[in-house]
Amino acid sequence: MTRRLTATLATLTISACLMGCVNRARFPAYYTLHVPPAIDVPIAGGPRPSLAVREFRSPAYLRQGAIVYRISPEQVGFYQYHRWAGDPREFVTNAIIDRLRATGRFAEVRAYDGRSDVDFVLNGRLEKIEEVDRYVEKSDDELSDLREAAEDVRAAYSPRGTVAPRSSARRCRVSLL
């Protein structure tokens, strides 16, 4: 009888330990980028160009699914259980399209589909996505850079309000915050 009781207690103890291991299985957490909704601006009169936005390019390590963190300026690591719910390039491209539509400066803004029936094509590169633990006010230099990029876009228009040909487009880098 004592042998049977000892065997039963040992079996229950081992089972309880194994159940504790099973319940500790970790599942990945999935994340998406939160971009505040675009504010609609009154549409200005006059001719407006059309714009297509190509899917932004990015380094391969940003497209692997696992969220990246930076150990040092030269080294990155990957969170094992934190993953993107979708491709970050798609998140950013769609956010840019929504923002440009809301400005009212373009007759049409759409994702680039390979057709050349638009006045401008916007290309971009997503170089890094970094964790933000707190809100940081933009410096005057950063705001000046954004203003210069906006002036480059305005410079594509001729004085009479018609759209300059695509060959006159300038390359500029804009950080989306």
Image: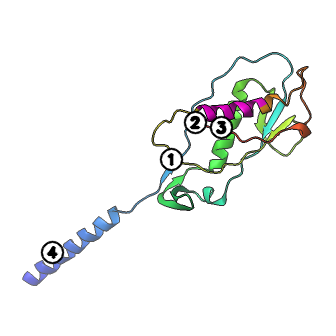
Which residue lies under the disc numbered 1? 131
Specify start and end residues of the magenta stretch as a single range: 140-151
> In front: 52, or 58?
58
Left or right of 80: which side holds 164?
A: right
Which tag, 4 or 3, sits closer to the chain's start?
Answer: 4
**In the rendered structure, are the residues bearing label 4 and label 1 in contact, judged by CB atoms less than 8 Å apart?**
no
Q: Relative to residue 162, is residue 168 depicted above or below?
A: below
The residues tagged by marks 4 and 3 sit, at their Cα atoms, a distance apart of: 60 Å
CA distance for labels 1 and 3: 18 Å
Q: Quadrant of residue 40?
A: top right
Q: Secondary structure at mark 4?
A: helix
Residue position for label 4: 9
Tell me the amino acid under the disc marked 2: Val
Q: Badge 3 local density, few (<14 within 10 Å), some, or many (20+)?
A: some
Location of the C terminus (image quadrant): top right
How many residues crowd mark 4 within 10 Å: few (<14), some (14–19), many (20+)?
A: few
The residue labelled by disc 2 is 35
Three-letter amino acid code of the residue under disc 1 = Glu
* Mark pair 2, 4: CA separation: 56 Å
- How far apart are labels 2 and 1 at the CA level? 14 Å
Residue 66, image x and y in percent? Answer: 54, 58
Tell me whether the residue at label 3 lies in contact with that at label 2, contact meaning CB atoms closer than 8 angstroms: yes
| Rendered image: mark on residue 95 | 3
Picture layout, residue 162 above or below residue 118 = above
Is residue 147 highlighted in magenta? yes
Q: Residue 45 sits in which quadrant? A: top right
**Which of the marked residues, 2 or 4, is nearer the chain's N terminus?**
4
Residue in the image at 70% along x and 30% along y: 147
Judge by depth and name the residue closer to the eye, 140 or 167.
140
Of label 4 and label 1, which has the lower sequence position? Answer: 4
